[in-house]
Image: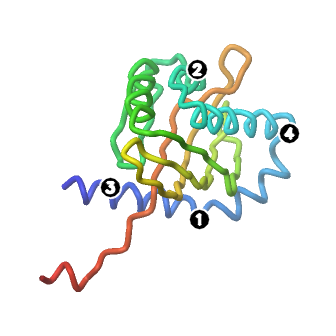
Amino acid sequence: MNSFRSISRFTLALVLYACWLHSLHAQTNTTLDQKIIAANRELDQRLMDAHALKDAALVESLFSESSGAFFIDPTGDPTEGRSNIRREWAAWFDTLETIRGDIQDVSYIPAGEGVIAVGTVIYTRKLRNGTADRKTVIWTDYRQIEKGRWVYLFRHAQWPLEPHNSAAAHK
């Protein structure tokens, strides 16, 4: 069941990404003010900085104070509320020796009082157990202005499923 849920969430994120990426990119330049685009890029960069610093308090500060704020991690597990988001990120950061995220692409589209973002980031990380890897993550989120600054209301990160070895599956 958990595998099905993960596949479904990945499929949804991938479909959103594939369908909207081209049109979102085109709309970024024509429908959003350059100051809004710059502020949203800064928000995304601050999240990358929080990763590099492994700073869960900084991550928490980037989310809305609304009780409806939530984050869905790359495994598909949802976390609601800023304090819970901070706890989950702190626990995850504790498993890492280092992490760096490099945003590959991001597109923004106006939506109501906020902005929807769709992007891809590649994380280079080293786990505390010494294992090093690179993960490509596709994300979608909704952000809005709160108390004069841009914050995430929700963020959904998903890494693509690893290809299955069909020969091993039949053994």
From the top left corner, tell me how far across and down residue 19 is, in percent.
59, 65
Query: Does the CB distance between marks 3 and 1 fall below 8 Å?
Result: no
Q: Which residue is mark 2?
A: 61
Placement of 154 over or under 109, stated as above or below: above
Query: Does the CB distance between marks 2 and 1 fall below 8 Å?
Result: no
Alpha-carbon distance for marks 2 and 1?
31 Å
Quadrant of image for the N terminus:
bottom left
Placement of 32 over or under 159, stated as above or below: above
User: In what element is the residue under mark 4?
Assistant: loop
Alpha-carbon distance for marks 3 and 4?
35 Å
Numbered disc in front, either 2 or 4: 2
From the top left corner, tell me how far across and down residue 149 is, in percent.
71, 21
Mark closest to the chain's N terminus, 2 or 4: 4
The residue at the far left in this view is 171
Dot label at residue 33: 4
Alpha-carbon distance for marks 4 and 1?
23 Å
Numbered disc in front, either 3 or 1: 3
Q: Amino acid at mark 1?
A: Cys
Q: State left or right for residue 107 relative to residue 89.
A: right
Numbered disc in front, either 3 or 4: 3
Numbered disc in front, either 3 or 2: 2
Residue drawn at point x = 46 percent, y = 20 percent:
82
User: In what element is the residue under mark 3?
Assistant: helix
Mark closest to the chain's N terminus, 4 or 1: 1
